[in-house]
């Protein structure tokens, strides 16, 4: 953008110098015309001289109008470039958030899933909650502060530990944070007899749900292999 601005400024400067030069030529032409000489001219010569001056004035006026139009075009081009750059920056930020490359903050919900002597959470349970939150419109999700993205693997390595992304070992309690429309997520999870809260509580799982207006989910802290991210998928 700085290069564009410098280029436009140079063009504006050249055009301004050109206009001033033309106008000074016009003034010179008029000032250097000796009044005595004009008076001594024949009527036909005087008429021709006036006609030529009018033509020069018209030509200068046309040049000024043309340059004003060019200036407008340059200004529009500069504005369009700025808008295009702002749009690209916005899309880049959205893309980085989508695939987990940036920290994200906003309203959302927090689920706390705790193992008990009666019930223990397995990877399939965590996957169910992640998918349900995506369905409810979550734009970013983490488990125990590990960002969940499209390529995240949630697997069991023992009855006590679950593995995320191949090397992040986590255990109960599992704290799932989700950023998005908290009202929609709450309604989805709390559907009577069908929502996950009722279903898990009726099966004697220890589950706690709370809303929060200021959740922070940190960026994914490993390299992302974009080859495995399919178009149209959300994180």
Image (spheres, rainbow, N blue to C red):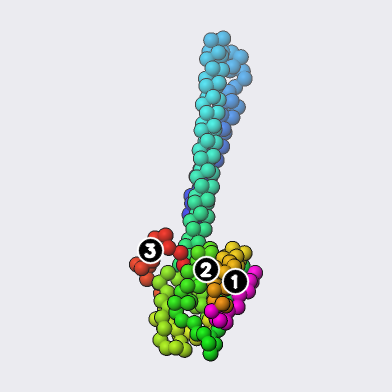
The residue under the point 48% across, 65% down is 98
First along the sequence among labels 3 and 2 = 2
Q: Is residue 39 visible?
A: yes
* Secondary structure category for the residue under label 3: loop
- Tell me if label 1 and label 2 are in contact, CB under 8 Å: yes
Number of residues whose C-alpha sits closer than 10 Å to that of mark 2, classed few (under 14), some (14–19) or many (20 or more): many
Q: Which residue is mark 3?
A: 230
**Image location of residue 215, percent across then percent down:** 60, 72
> Real-space Cα distance between discs 1 and 2?
10 Å
Q: Which residue is mark 2?
A: 133
Kindly report the secondary structure that dominates the magenta region of the rendered protein. Answer: strand
In this rendering, is residue 152 above or below 232? below
Which is nearer the eye, 118 or 34? 118
Residue at position x 59%, y 13% from top?
A: 40
Q: Which residue is mark 1?
A: 109
Q: Is residue 215 left or right of residue 162?
A: right
Q: Which residues are magenta?
A: 203-218
């Amino acid at each position: 953008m700085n290069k564009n601005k410098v280029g436009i400024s140079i063009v504006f400067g050249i055009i301004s110098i050109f206009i001033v030069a033309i106008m000074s030529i016009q003034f010179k032409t008029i000032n250097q015309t000796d009044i005595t000489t004009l008076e001594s001219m024949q009527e036909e010569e005087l008429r021709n001289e006036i006609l030529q001056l009018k033509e020069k004035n018209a030509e200068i006026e046309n040049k000024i109008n043309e340059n004003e139009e060019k200036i407008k075009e340059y200004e529009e081009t500069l504005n369009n470039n700025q808008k295009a750059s702002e749009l690209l920056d916005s899309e880049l930020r959205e893309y980085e958030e989508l695939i987990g490359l940036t920290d994200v903050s906003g309203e959302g919900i927090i689920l706390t899933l705790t193992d008990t002597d009666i019930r223990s959470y397995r990877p399939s349970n965590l996957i169910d909650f992640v998918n349900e939150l995506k369905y409810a419109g979550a734009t970013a999700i983490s488990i125990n502060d590990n960002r969940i993205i499209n390529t995240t693997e949630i697997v069991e390595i023992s009855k006590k530990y679950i593995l995320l992304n191949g090397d992040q070992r986590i255990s109960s309690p599992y704290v799932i944070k989700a950023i998005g429309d908290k009202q929609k997520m709450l309604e989805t999870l709390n559907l009577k007899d069908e929502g996950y809260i009722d279903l898990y509580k009726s099966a004697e799982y220890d589950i706690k749900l709370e809303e929060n207006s200021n959740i922070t989910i940190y960026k994914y802290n490993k390299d992302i292999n974009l080859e495995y991210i399919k178009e149209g998928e959300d994180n």
